[in-house]
Image: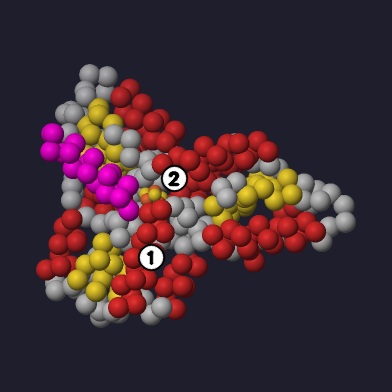
Amino acid sequence: MCFGVRDALRKTQQVAAAEPVTVLGQLVHNPEVSEQLQALGVREGRLEEVGQSATRQVVITAHGAADVQRKAWSEAGHAVVDTTCPLVKKAHGALGRLVEAGYFPVVVGKKNHVEVRGLTGDFPGAVVIETLADLDDLPLSGSLGVVSQTTQPLAWVERVVACIRERRPHGEVRFIDTVCQPTKDRQEALEGLCQRSEVVIVVGGHNSNNTRELVTKAASLGAIAYHVERASELEARWFDGVTDVGVTAGTSTLDETVDAVVARLRSMAAARTAAPLRAQPLLR
Ligand code: SF4
């Protein structure tokens, strides 16, 4: 679990112990974390439904929000606890500086992801590039300022920036790399893991962007990759004739979930009489 998610979780648990609290969205995209918070009485609300919270205290998630949304919740009389990851804040700052300097705002990321909606929320005209087809939405003239969602693969973001520059050989395109370091580290480590493993298990929420990016990258590197949220989802048939299994996890996955996956793999291996299966935890 990355420091941004860990800190957001700790802060929410602390405030929930003192006063009832509503998290505006999913604190992190991990069902086990959501279950833990529900057990503490933490409610879940919607960032977009300003003022529609039964609790005075509300939490902005690690994915962040637009300033305009933060302000609207405060003005509606709520105490806003902000757990936005500092690296998401850095991306907001980078985009804000580009706009102030006169650049047209461009974000490389998933259009409907909460972090991207937060990034563009203060700049309603911003263009989000999710696929290369979205390049057609860019304005035909003027300087472009580009940042990315923090959990996008850097290689993809750089490819998009190169395509933008190719289309605008005479226009200025300024790119600030806002992919976060934990995402870069995982993506890079995955390359080594795929070389050593016949099958790669990626542990994390099914709606976690960085987890899904790890699955996509493992598959693009030629590995057979499976995405599981928890140990009970592992299927013995995935490992028929397999001896080396790699394990990695998204940045919002609990340590105990990864431990449980590795333990189940080891017990599946132990149950075999031939071809022992070795589980290689990558990031521990
Ligand atoms: S994935 Fe990166 S940006 Fe997101 S919470 Fe973790 S460290 Fe922060």
Q: Which mark is residue 87?
A: none
Residue 267, by quadrant, is bottom right
Residue at the outermost top position = 170
Find numbered disc 1 in the image and state the secondary structure of the residue it sits on.
helix
Which is nearer the eye, 35 or 6? 6
Q: Is residue 59 visible?
A: yes
Q: Residue at x 63, y 49 (%)?
A: 281
Q: Earlier in the sequence, mark 2 or mark 1?
A: 1
Above-or-below relation of 9 to 179:
below
Display coloring = secondary structure
SS for dot 2: helix
The residue tagged 2 is 182
**Residue 44 located left or right of residue 226:** left
Label 1 Cα crowd, 10 Å radius (few <14 / some 14-19 / many 20+):
few
Kind of residue at disc 2: Pro
Comparing 79 with 123, the one in front is: 79
Judging by the rendered image, the residue that carries numbered circle 1 is: 10
- In the rendered view, does 148 fall on the left or right side of 142? right
Q: Nearer the viewer, mark 2 or mark 1?
A: 1
Residue type for callout 1: Arg
Magenta stretch encompasses residue 97: yes
3 in magenta = no
Q: Residue at x 28, y 67 (%)?
A: 59
Which stretch did the figure color magenta?
85-102
Find out if the beta carbon at label 2 lies less than 8 Å from the nearest ligand 1 atom.
yes
* Residue at left offset 34%, top offset 30%: 161
Out of 119 and 11, give the one closest to the viewer: 11
Residue drawn 77% across the image and 51% down it: 277
Q: Main secondary structure of the magenta part?
A: helix
Left-right relation of 86 to 67:
right
Q: Residue 204, how many percent across, how many down? A: 52, 57
